[in-house]
Amino acid sequence: MSEKELTQEEIDKLLAKANKPAEDAMRLHPFYMGKMQTVPKCSVWGFDAFAVWYTPGVAKACRAIAENPAESFRMTNRANTIAVVSDGTRVLGLGDIGPEAGQPVMEGKALLFKYLGGVDAFALSIGNAYNEKGEAKRLTAEEIINFVKLVQPSVGGINLEDISKPKCYGVLETLRNDPEVTIPVWHDDAQGTASVVVGGVIGAAHHVGKELDQLKVAMLGVGSANTRTAYVLESAGVPLKNITMADSKSIITKDRPDIIEQKDYDTFKYDLAQKTNSEGLSGDFSNAMEGADVMISASKSAEDVVKKEWISKMASDSIVFACANPIPEIWPWKAKAAGARVVGTGRSDFDNQINNSLGFPGIFRGTLDVNATTITDEMCVAAAQAIADIAIKKGTTDKYVIPTMDEWELYPYEATKVGMKAIEQGVARTIMEEDELFKIAEEKIKYARDLTKSLMDNNFIAPPI
């Protein structure tokens, strides 16, 4: 379909479809008053059950854990529980809206963790101390780090979410390298986005017949998402020298004065400026687009941030992933009209959704099932390859290079590949065979879906109005 084939009426219908989820959200959020609740997982056979689950019986379990803290993964729900932690300083495409306003997103994350991955997740939006003027004070990196370390005994993992750059880097790297932190800490806006984007690149490159190590990649945005995506692309086989990145100012280069000045503040940006852009390009992002096989944008959520004429300068069979939400940097029909062969966005109402939900539920499922201490870039690549595998096995097309959320078989498969990679790398505390790991993941995911269906069928969850 070319843009000339779209009438104004057709464009209006597409835009109306794009706006409908927001309209439904305003209706259904107050109807349900939130998305998550807690329900028992143990049997309550009578009131004498509480003598087992609470006092006096629970004391025996407490003593066992006091003698060996690792028993907390066996005697409590810790092994299947993560905390979704956010200070609300970079929420979706909304920016610094604060922890209260970010809580609907964190609850939504918890819902996806449970339904897609069988993982119990608690939404913990933190911060908002107020000064005498009533102004909100956002948490420092050190305060977030301390919070995570304090909550660690209750959970088996931490999902950091929607924390502004570069604070998010300091929080993630400090916690991942702190010997006192013995559970996996993951930043979904960085590692999660990277895993799914790379999965899409692998699937799309396979579809158009291009090798990863030969791809020329242009990336718009040097925030947490694209920064980690660049490194995971490298781990997957795309040389950093083949990647050219640009921020809101221009292409990043080794000698750009502001990058050098802030190298201690934004160390990853400085590092990428030294290792990418082997052609020595400078100036506008359009220069990076010329001859590029792949364009990945994670920048401003607005129309026409990426121009049609830029895409027209890309290589044949080009791949365009415009990932900003809720408005992609370029609408898919415009990218297609400009010559792109494969186009993906972050939205579910267009083909090839580059959706973090394809990654984090399965990745954490596998991580928790082998009781891993961290989530490495290689585990992210294993997830990316698993995502691509599902699409490739089913047969890729221009409109299908990455699976959708309703292909539930992805999640146990992805969990298994991630867990096995953790075992291979020596970061897993529970060792098992691949078929056993797959069976565990499949059972836990199926349980979560069946539980939700049962609650709906029996009207404990009311149908939407």
Image (cartoon, helix red, strand yellow):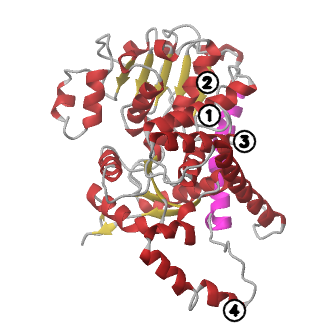
Q: Nearer the viewer, mark 2 or mark 4?
A: 4
Residue underneath mark 4: 48
Does the image show residue 76?
no
174 left or right of 27?
Answer: left
Residue 370's x, y, as percent?
55, 52
The CA span between labels 4 and 3 is: 40 Å
Q: Nearer the viewer, mark 4 or mark 3?
A: 4
Q: Please provide the residue range marked out in magenta.
A: 9-35
Disc 2 residue type (three-letter):
Gly
Q: Is 178 or 271 nearer to us in this picture?
A: 178
Q: Give me the disc on residue 203.
A: 2
> Sequence-wise, which precedes: disc 1 or disc 4?
4
Does the image show residue 395?
yes
Residue 431's x, y, as percent?
55, 50
Total residue callouts: 4
How packed mark 2 is, by other alpha carbons closer than 10 Å (few <14, some 14-19, many 20 or more), is many
Residue 41's x, y, as percent?
67, 72
Q: Is 373 or 363 nearer to us in this picture?
A: 373
| SS at badge 2 | helix
The CA span between labels 2 and 3 is: 17 Å
Residue underneath mark 1: 387
Indicate the quadrant where residue 345 lies: top right
Contact, CB < 8 Å: mark 1 with mark 2?
Answer: yes
Disc 4 residue type (three-letter):
Asp
The CA span between labels 2 and 4 is: 55 Å
| SS at badge 3 | loop
How packed mark 1 is, by other alpha carbons closer than 10 Å (few <14, some 14-19, many 20 or more), is many
The CA span between labels 3 and 1 is: 10 Å
Q: Give me the disc on residue 409.
A: 3
Vertical comparison of 279 with 227: above or below? above
Contact, CB < 8 Å: mark 3 with mark 1?
Answer: no
